[in-house]
Amino acid sequence: MIRPRIPVNPLPTGIVTPLITTAPAPVEQHHTTACTCQHTTPAPAPVASGPAVRLSPAGVLAVVGGGAAVVLVVGAVLVSMLLAVAITGASVAVCAVVLRSLLNDSRKR
């Protein structure tokens, strides 16, 4: 069936041999003297100078308001569930007291 492939490392050097190897990128050879082959140099990658997401003050207020609304809704749901459990427990206790009194009355007669 499925067997794990463990990399083989004959010496305990601490260097793990990867299972998948990628081919190295081709190296462009440049001439030592001036040439007419018109080499092009790759453009440098743009450097991010700040955070990726910028929020306006209205955006910050919207995020804070949305977070507060989520907290209030989750809190209301949890409180209502706790209240439902408490009401159910109280009604079961009242039923137990009524049944106990009915059974005790029938035994005394």
Image: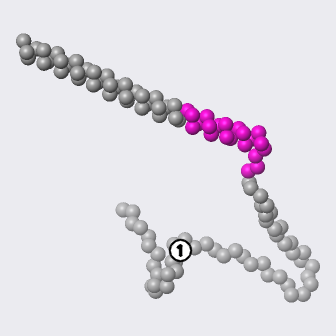
Residue visible at 44% across and 73% down in the picture: 6
Q: Position of residue 52 (x, y in %)?
A: 74, 54
Left or right for 85, reference 104: right
- Say above or below: 33 vs 38: below
Left or right for 14, reference 69: left
- In the picture, the quarter occupied by the N terminus is bottom left
- Foreground: 50 or 18? 50
Span of residues in magenta: 53-73
Q: Secondary structure at mark 1?
A: loop
Residue visible at 23% across and 21% down in the picture: 97
Outermost residue to the front: 108
Q: Position of residue 17 (x, y in %)?
A: 52, 77
* Residue wearing tag 1: 18
Task: Check disc 1 and give the amino acid type.
Answer: Pro
On the image, which quarter does residue 48 sit in? bottom right
Q: Position of residue 35 (x, y in %)?
A: 91, 82
Residue visible at 66% across and 76% down in the picture: 24
Q: Is residue 13 magenta?
A: no
How crowded is the residue under tag 1: few (<14 C-alpha within 10 Å), some, or many (20+)?
A: few
Q: How is the image coloured?
A: one colour
Outermost residue to the top: 109
